[in-house]
Amino acid sequence: MSKNENKKVKQRQFPLGVKLAVIIGFIVLASLGTVTFLNSWFVSKDVRITAEENNLTINTRSSSSVQNELLSVRSNVLQLLDLINAASGGRTSALAKQAEAFFFERNQSIAEVIVLTQYQFTHNLVIHTRLKNNRFFTSNEIDLEATDSLLSQSEKSLVRACSGETIALNASPFFKNEMIALLLPYRESGLEQCCLILFSLESISSILGTGSSNETFMINDSSELLCHPENERILSGQSMKNHPLVKEMREKKPE
């Protein structure tokens, strides 16, 4: 068989139409693959942006609700103290005791309210007023002396509060229950004082939620964990100082 005949046989084995079909097939597959990849990439990016926006919205609403809850506790306690101070006969009067009883009956999550005075020359902190919700301590099986341990280990924070700062502390390790201590500056008769409010985290925990899809936690200015879906972390007094998110937040904090 001649060379020309061999070429003709090869051309018959791979006609031009087949070659074109193969080429077009590769082009179509490549196009479909590229389109599918780009579509998946853009969709995943859009889903991520939407999830981040939803997460930001949820956390913004949660932080606003928690702030309102703290302001409500603060307002209620200060109203009680103003009423007691205005009552004739002071703290021991029948009106003051009745106001205290009604207050703890309507605010069962508040365990104790303490007003401390810092004297100018000695800088010692002395308890001026102490209102204790005995029902709260009894129902939660909490040692009545647990507050004294908190006071002794929180002296620096109490001094800061007397100087005008508002501070939140994790009181859970002292009471073996989910609790928070809110320290407020307080002024009465020109004295340099602070008010310590101890209350349960139940209402704040319900606001932040416990769902695994959106883990929201709360810390204070020292990166101390105040509220978290995992109760063990709060009870152990865990710090979030080395948490990547907290580090990034501290680094981006405006001056």
Image: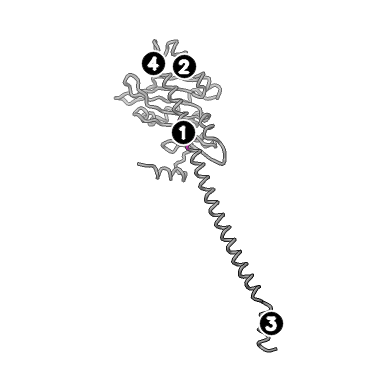
Image coordinates for residue 209, horizontal then vertical, percent? 54, 35
In the picture, which quadrant includes the N terminus?
bottom right
**Local secondary structure at mark 3:** helix
Q: Which of marks 1 and 3 precedes in the sequence?
A: 3
What is the C-alpha distance between the residues marked 1 and 4?
A: 31 Å
Establish if 232 lies above or below 96.
below
Which picture quadrant has residue 187? top left
The residue at which mark 4 appears reads as 85
Q: Is residue 13 magenta?
A: no
Image coordinates for residue 208, horizontal then vertical, percent? 52, 35
**Local secondary structure at mark 1:** helix
Q: Is residue 62 magenta?
A: yes
At label 3, counting other C-alpha atoms closer than 10 Å, the crowd grade (few under 14, some 14-19, many 20 or more) is few
The residue at which mark 3 appears reads as 9
Image coordinates for residue 21, horizontal then vertical, percent? 64, 70
Q: Amino acid at mark 3?
A: Val
Main SS type for the magenta part?
helix
Determine which of the numbered discs, if any, sits on residue 188 in the image. none
Q: Nearer the viewer, residue 174 or 35?
A: 35
Numbered disc in front, either 1 or 4? 1
Pointers 1 and 2 in contact (CB under 8 A)? no
Determine which of the numbered discs, if any, sits on residue 100 in the image. 2
Numbered disc in front, either 1 or 2? 1
What is the C-alpha distance between the residues marked 3 and 1?
A: 82 Å
What is the C-alpha distance between the residues marked 3 and 4?
A: 113 Å
Residue at 40% from the left image edge and 24% from the top image edge: 195
The residue at which mark 1 appears reads as 64
User: Which segment is the magenta one?
Assistant: 60-67
Left or right side of 211 for 12: right
